[in-house]
Image (cartoon, rainbow, N blue to C red):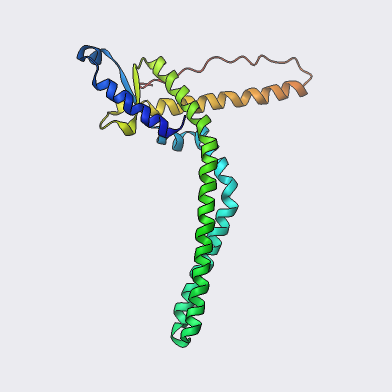
Amino acid sequence: MTTQTLRRLSLVMALALMLMAPAAFAQSKFGVVDVDKIIARSRTVSQAVKAAEAKLKVRQDQIDAKMTEMQSARQELDRKRSVMSEDQVKAEEDKINRQREAIEDLQHETNKELARIRQEVMPPEVNRIMEAVRQVANTEGYDLVLPAETVLFHTEKVDITPLVIQLLDKNSAAEKPESVEKSSDTDSDEKPKSTRRARPRLPRNND
């Protein structure tokens, strides 16, 4: 499920919410969650995105270097334009234009590749976010949770974004020691220790 699909579903839920009976509306507990903020602030999600984007860092560095080279050529042409013939100026301008077109083509291909990588990375991360939202909603007793960008106004009281971020990062931190512990048990002659851990307590709004 992509964030675009999530937003479309949220609009449907918002319309359904408007059609609810007043009594049912008053008795229900609603929350909002900012998916973009989760992606930006959650260590688990942001690290996955950054790891994917790092694959294109070399190409982006090349683009930046070519851009700097083109800008230097443009400044040099402007500086010497008064002492150059029209043919020389035209030749230099044509050269700079070819550089610009090459940079634009490379940037376009890089952007396409970045979009493809994000499409591969984001669906699993969005699924993790949705599962965390479900767990928080169940624990905190929310009847309905909507993406914040589809809500015209809400107070911080109904914003469960911080709880979702905390849960995602706690789950990620809880997974890492287990793999380390298993590897140490394999190499050690000592009696293996139990890997069973207490279930982490979900933080609440008033914690």
- Image check: 75 left or right of 149? right
Query: Residue 38: x percent and y percent?
Result: 43, 33
How many marks the image carries: the answer is 0
- Image check: 21 left or right of 198? left
Q: Residue at x 58, y 58 (%)?
A: 62
Query: Residue 146: x percent and y percent?
Result: 34, 26
Residue 184 falls in which quadrant of the image?
A: top right
Q: Nearer the viewer, residue 199 or 101?
A: 101
Q: Residue at x 54, y 59 (%)?
A: 63
> Which part of the image, by quadrant, shows the C terminus?
top left
Query: Residue 22: x percent and y percent?
Result: 20, 15
Q: Is residue 33 above or below residue 51?
A: above
Q: Is residue 151 above or below residue 139?
A: below
Residue furthest out toward the left: 22
Q: Residue at x 53, y 24 (%)?
A: 171
Query: Residue 163: x percent and y percent?
Result: 41, 25
- Image check: 196 left or right of 184? left
Q: Is residue 141 above or below residue 158?
A: above
Q: Is residue 99 above or below residue 11?
A: below
Residue furthest out toward the right: 189
